[in-house]
Amino acid sequence: MNELDIDVQVLYQTLFLRPITSNPDIEFGLCHSYNRWLAWINEQAPERLRWVVCPPILSMDKVREELEFGKKHGACGIFIRAFENEKLLNDAYLYPLYELAGELDLAVCLHAGLNGTMVHEFFRESNFNRFKLTGVGAFHHLLWSDTPEKFPKVRWGFIELSAQWVPYALNDLQLKYKMFRC
């Protein structure tokens, strides 16, 4: 980091870029242990190594505990993917997560990846579609459904998707708003 003049690095989990399990107990165990490991890593250089907490989406009753733990131990955001357990990101099931993000001042960070077995398998032959376009589509869908407006305290990040697509997506939304919401 010093050689590259990097002041702060935010650590993201590669393991969770794809669907792993639909079992809530297994998912909780993986998220819980991963979050404790990242907290330990953060202790090595808390001013330089930040991280995003991995919420156990299938166990929403345990999400607060994980997010509060993460916030207390150096997490600066919450890891999500373009689909979460076959749900689009505007699904009301995820609203408690967004409420907590605003309350705890943790950015919601959508990483290039998805947690939807059906979509993941459908795009098996195309990592571009599977990991990049689903994130662009999630951005578009979040804005179209006004989800960010429902959670004004939440900061949203789209990670490892580049940014050239943002003007295209915003232009497309503007055209659709004119056509369908006037």
Image (cartoon, grey):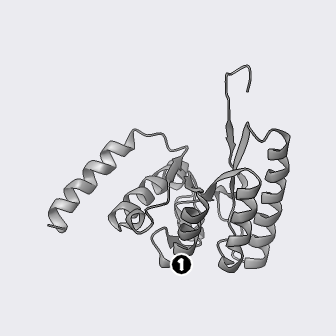
Residue that appears at 74% across and 38% down: 47
Q: Position of residue 159 (x, y in %)?
A: 55, 46
**Left or right of 167 in this view: 136:** right
The crowd level at tag 1 (other Cα within 10 Å; few <14, some 14-19, many 20+) is some
Tell me: residue 5, above or below residue 56.
Answer: above
Residue type, numbered disc 1: Tyr
Question: Is residue 155 or residue 136 the one in the foreground?
Answer: 155
Q: Which of 103 and 149 is in front in this view?
A: 103
Does residue 121 show up?
Answer: no
Q: Position of residue 72 (x, y in %)?
A: 75, 57
* Left or right: 153 as drawn, with respect to 104: left
When asked about the image quadrant of residue 20, the answer is: bottom right
Q: Mark 1 highlights which residue?
A: 93
Quarter placement of the N terminus: top right
Which residue shows up at 53% across the image and 67% down it? 98
The quarter of the rendered structure image containing the C terminus is: bottom left
Image quadrant where residue 25 sits: bottom right
Q: Where 147 sits versus 161, above or below? A: below
Q: Residue furthest top?
A: 3
Where is residue 118 shown, x and y percent of the image? 55, 70
